[in-house]
Structures are given as structure tokens and as C-alpha cells.
Amino acid sequence: MLGMFTALWPAAAQTRLAVDAAVESPSSPWQWILHGVRAVPGPAGGMDLVLVPGWGNGDAAADLRLSFDGEAPVDEAGNWAVTMSGSYERSSAELARLGEGAGVFRAPSSKLALKPERSVLALPGSQAGDFSMDFWLKPSRAENGEIILIWKASKRSGTSWRSQQYSVLIQKNRLVFGFINFFEDPSGKATTVSLSGRSMLLPARWSHHILRFDSATGLLEYLMDGVPEAVTYVTSTGRQGGEVFPPRAGSAGLLELGANYTGLIDEFRILPSWVENPATRRYQPEGGWAESPIYDLGSTNARILWLECSAIEPGEGAVHWFYRCADSSAGWRDGDPAWVPFLPGVAMDSRGRYIQLRAELYPDAAGERSPSLTQAVIVYEPDDAPSPPAKLLATAGNGSIRVEWSASAEADVRGYVLYYGYASRDYFGGGADQGTSPVVIEGRNVTSFTLTGLENGRLYFLALAAYDGADPPHVGEFSAELYARPSRVSP
């Protein structure tokens, strides 16, 4: 649904400030702040705001993590050395499942070799506890015999050595996990464990896969797209309650990813924990948010009429809008001033010189589509200083000057300021009973004022200005200049 809102309002004095993610503010202490949101080039130019795929899926405790977001694949956990082989390349962000790219593999000419350096799970001879392995897969063909990954090592058994291996293969369009001598039988016997999925892999379609092991019970479980596919117990009885066979890595191990596979792999992780709730959505339900810089509307007490917002909200996706404004932006912090929710296009009557916007983005119910924010338009009336009074008349008296004028027609006028002095356009006079120049005259309907205590025979120059109800008030321009000379013989 395209959410483009426009309100009806008198057009006089309206000013429009259009902003998007590329519009910064030189007067703001910060620019755009994005949390789970990123800026992307929009189809109409400018920068649009969308949710970040996979935001919140990361795990700082991962033993191995390949996001494929960089130009070259690296273990972001810092425990494995990664070497590219053959024609490996990174996909564009548009083709990736999450983040900025996915690994592109073409059998048999491309693969990644991963060597453990500081890995806890692959440390030779060490007994691992809980672990999980998860990744996204988008096969081109899903052909029988394709090898997604394979681990090979050697393991001592008494005085001899055994080969150790675990692998993820495609057989009959299904994923199969196999382990040879990876789980250790305390009696010293060789072990073989296999789990085969029930659901078929569909070519050119992303699917999520996770294998997880519970070291307390020996439960080994495989899920596809969050749904259990296969389960077994790696115990002496093959059932719950038997003696658990712990996982133990062999020596000189090497993990090959995409060893004989054509397609995409994204967000490959091995974690030293049981992942209870796998993240199978492209976008997380909690969404993300963006906060704009603080924009200066140019004058205190500016009247904000409404805000127009252009956004695409797919399916159940939504954008919630907030703003805050004040005549000063000094000392603004999180939540102070408080954020006020608003509906785009609905008339409002807030005032302030500085304004900041906040948008909260939520994906559709399936977590597959993100809202897209194109532009926000702040429609406001600057609180300009009032125009000067008209039809002025100055009448000299004995030690006084009476000034008369027509009342201002502007609704926000709160009074007038009378300036006086001894030279044209030099209004620094003093000595009047009402004080030195300028003299404040309260009341918008006042149309005359008399200065007293003036020096007879001296020529005075005078001008009048109006002021409004802003805090501090805006004082307008000078009126036409008047002059008068008090005298004892004056009326």
C-alpha cells in the first residue's frame, strides 16, 4: 500500500521542508541515526530507508561466522582461517538472503577451505559440549551428490589412527548430515551417525537449516525452516537415557565449504550452544527505527501544520511516526523532549523552531517484506515578525509627544515598541518619564501613547514597531519615521 498523505490547509505563508535519509542538518549535533534500518538509493532518486535483513540474528558467541558481506569471506568470530579456491565470488545484496551479499559457489571449481586456529569446537582432542550449526541455502539445481560441506581430520584410537569426518550432502533432493567418528564412544568403538531430512530442497529458493546437539541428553536434531526434519540420540542405547557420546574433534582438521555445490550460501555459523529459537525470518518482528537530524525551521514559534510522509507498507508491514519540537534544541537527549506520535497528513498545531522526526518500521507478518520510506515533508508557517503599524501621527506638547497609529490587523500582535532619539534613524534617546528608548507598549489594540518628561525645544525622531507573542517575542521592522519638537506653547 502506498501511503502518501496530503492535508487541506490555507495556502498562505506555508513553507515546506522535504527531507529523506540524504538530507543532513548543519545545525544538528547529530545526523541520521539508524537502528536495524539502512539507507538505500530510491527508485525516484534520493535515499530510501528500509529494514536491514537479518538484523538481530547475529551471535557474538559464535565459534565460526561467515556473513559473506565483505569483498572476501572471513570468519567474523576470528577463530578460523579462510582460504578461497577457484571461482568463488560474492553475490549482490539483492540476491543475498541477509546482509550485503551471499557466497556464490559453482561446482566443482569453487570452494572455501577453513582451518581452525582458535576454535573451541575444533580444538584437537578437546571434548565439546552443546553446539549448533546453521546456514541459509539456495541451490541452483539441488542435484544428488552435491556436497555442501565436509570436515576431515584424523583421530587417535588406542595405538592406531582413524579418519574422522562430518558432512552435509544432498541426496534425493534432501539434506543429509553424516558423522563418522566425530561422536566418541567411551568403549572405543567406531561411530557413525546420520540424519536425513524429509522435506525436499527447491532449486532457486532460499531455505534455512540448523543442526543442534544437546550434550546433556545426546539429542541431535535437524530443522529446516524452523520445522523438525530428523532427530536421533547419540547415546549408547540410541535413545534418551543412554550414555551420551560426546563430540571430540580430531587432529589436522580442515573444513571445506561448497566443496561440490552450485548455488548460494549465506550466514553460515557454528555456535558452542544449543540454539533454541532459530531465526528463520528475513526481518525480525521487532523491526527497526530511524531518527532524523534536528532541523531548524528558521524562527522561534514556527507553527507546524502537518507532516506528509511517503512510504510503502507491504501487507501487514507498518511505519509508526513520531516527532518532537521546541524553540531550543540545546540539551536534547533520548526521550527528552518526549516523542509525540502523529498520523501523516492530519492537521496539528505544534510550535517550535527545531523539529526532529522518528520512524519505526515493522515488517509484514511473514517477516519477508520491509516497509520503505521515501520522504517526509514538514509543512509549517514561519512565525515572522509582525509588519509595522501604519497611519502614524506625532503631536508635540509641553514636554511631551503624543504618537497615534492604526491598530495592527495581525492576530499574533501583543503590543508595540516605541523608539525615540535625537537624530534620524538614531533611536538611543533618554530622559522620558517612561524610560530610555525603546519603550514597550503592551496591548495589541492600543492605538496611542504619550511620551512625557521630554526637553522642550529639542527635536525628537520617533519610530514604532509591533511585537508578537513568541517567547522571546519577535519585534518587527520600524515604521515610517516621525519627528516632533516639544514646546511650552504646544497644545
Image (tube, grey):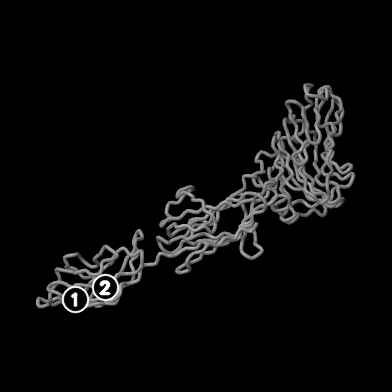
What percent of the width, then of the height, locates residue 474?
Answer: 35, 64
| Nearer-the-camera pick, 34 or 384 | 384
* Residue under the point 49% across and 62% down: 26
Image quarter where the N terminus lies is: bottom right
Element at label 2: strand
Q: Crowding at label 1, few (<14), some or many (≥20) Cα neighbours within 10 Å? A: some
* Residue under the point 69% across and 39% down: 62
Q: Report the residue marked by disc 2.
A: 405
| Nearer-the-camera pick, 432 or 217 | 432
What percent of the width, then of the height, locates residue 87?
Answer: 82, 55
- Tell me the kind of residue under disc 1: Thr
What percent of the width, then of the height, locates residue 304?
Answer: 46, 60
Most distant residue in the left direction: 488
Spatial CA distance of label 2 from label 1 is 12 Å
| Nearer-the-camera pick, 59 or 112 | 59
Q: Is 4 situated above or below 419?
A: above
Element at label 1: strand
Q: Report the residue marked by disc 1.
A: 395
| Nearer-the-camera pick, 340 or 335 | 340
Mark closest to the chain's N terminus, 2 or 1: 1
* Residue under the point 19% across and 65% down: 434
Residue 443 location, quadrant: bottom left
Q: Is 325 situated above or below 136?
A: below
What percent of the width, then of the height, locates residue 91?
Answer: 75, 55
Contact flag, marks 2 and 1 (Cβ < 8 Å) = no
Residue 184 location, quadrant: top right
